């Protein structure tokens, strides 16, 4: 396998971005699991005299939820990396240190800081050195491995060690982060946003991303539209809409199938359903 220094910069940046987004997904799972002990609405709860979620973080997440509610099925899904790290730091000794043992806290915080410092320049197209991109990948993998080991140890959520989707996008501008609990199909209603109405004659591209901690040769991705009559395979699915797609609720459904003999949900390991409205041509 080539090192990051041996491949094109655009590809290096894409690899690093996907690793960071996989880390974000794992941290959301970890935070949701640990803080759910406070109650299902932990983001609004108070322990003693202090809110569980610091107000500055809560306000930012609330604003994001309010502006694009269709993108975020749960409160935790609207958090970003810096906010997730701040929540982890706020409750580290009491609720999260157990997940990263035996790594010393100073090491864990150094890795979090390294990924966070590089995330914004990377996501906004600014300059990133090869060293910075390598750190993003290595630190993300180490932190994800710690999360995996934690869930395996408590036999929760990731008791089935199989890949999951992390993101769904389309050429209309829809972006959905995928963090559904294990075994549950993620359902997103694009019709609730501004880019959920499609038209006959359009060529639309759909794409999914998978947790980067699972090699691409260990699974396959299958697509289905129009109730199984239009099929595809691979991370990208291009669909030219015809009259048979016309519906107030057209479903685009990618499924993820690992190379294992068993699968988390019977015949597949993860699935997404995205709902669109398809209108007839003029």
Image (tube, helix red, strand yellow):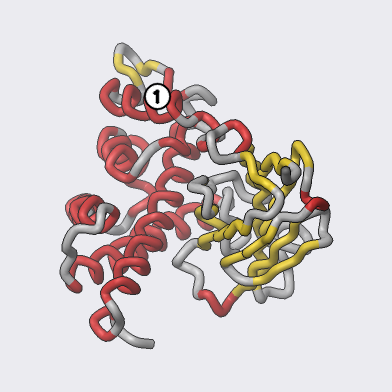
Question: Relative to the observer, which residue lies in front, 54 or 274?
Answer: 274
Residue furthest to the top in view is: 49
Question: Residue 54's image quarter?
Answer: top left
Q: Relative to 130, say whether 185 is above or below.
A: above
Q: Residue at x 68, y 42 (%)?
A: 275
Residue furthest to the front in view is: 282
Image quadrant holding the C terminus, namely top right
Position of 103 with respect to 200 (left or right) is: left
Q: Relative to 238, say whether 123 is above or below.
A: above
Q: Residue 220, percent across and down?
A: 64, 72
Question: Relative to the observer, which residue lies in front, 28 or 88?
Answer: 28
Q: Residue at x 53, y 35 (%)?
A: 194
Q: Look at mark 1 in the image and give the residue it sits on.
A: 62
Position of 282 with respect to 43 (left or right) is: right
Q: Is residue 175 visible?
A: no
Q: Residue at x 33, y 35 (%)?
A: 94
Image quadrant holding the N terminus, namely bottom left
Q: Relative to 256, say whether 48 is above or below.
A: above
Q: Residue at x 16, y 63 (%)?
A: 127
Q: Residue 132, percent across and down?
A: 19, 66
Q: Is residue 150 visible?
A: yes
Q: Residue 95, percent across and down?
A: 37, 38
Question: Relative to the observer, which residue lies in front, 158 or 227?
Answer: 227
Position of 255 with respect to 102 (left or right) is: right
Question: Residue 122's image quarter?
Answer: bottom left
């Amino acid at each position: 396998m080539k090192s990051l220094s041996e491949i094109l910069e655009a590809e290096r940046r894409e690899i690093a971005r996907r690793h960071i987004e996989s880390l974000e997904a794992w941290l959301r799972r970890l935070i949701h699991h640990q803080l759910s002990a406070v109650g299902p609405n932990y983001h609004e709860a108070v322990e003693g005299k202090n809110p569980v979620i610091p107000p500055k973080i809560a306000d930012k997440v609330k604003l994001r939820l309010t502006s694009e509610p269709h993108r975020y099925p749960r409160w935790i899904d609207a958090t970003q990396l810096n906010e997730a790290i701040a929540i982890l730091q706020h409750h580290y000794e009491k609720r999260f240190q157990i997940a990263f043992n035996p790594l010393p806290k100073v090491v864990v915080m150094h890795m979090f800081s390294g990924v966070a410092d590089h995330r914004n320049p990377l996501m906004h197209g600014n300059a990133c050195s090869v060293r910075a991109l390598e750190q993003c990948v290595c630190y993300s993998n180490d932190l994800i491995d710690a999360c995996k080991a934690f869930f395996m140890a408590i036999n929760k959520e990731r008791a089935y060690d199989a890949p999951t989707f992390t993101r769904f996008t389309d050429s209309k501008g829809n972006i959905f982060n995928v963090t559904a609990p294990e075994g549950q199909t993620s359902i997103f209603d694009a019709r609730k946003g501004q880019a959920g109405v499609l038209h006959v004659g359009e060529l639309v591209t759909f794409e999914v991303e998978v947790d980067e901690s699972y090699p691409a040769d260990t699974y396959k991705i299958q697509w289905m539209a129009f109730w199984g009559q239009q099929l595809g395979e691979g991370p990208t699915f291009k669909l030219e809409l015809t009259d048979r797609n016309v519906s107030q609720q057209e479903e685009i459904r990618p499924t993820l199938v690992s190379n294992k003999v068993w699968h988390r949900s019977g015949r597949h390991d993860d699935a997404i359903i995205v709902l669109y409205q398809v209108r007839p041509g003029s």
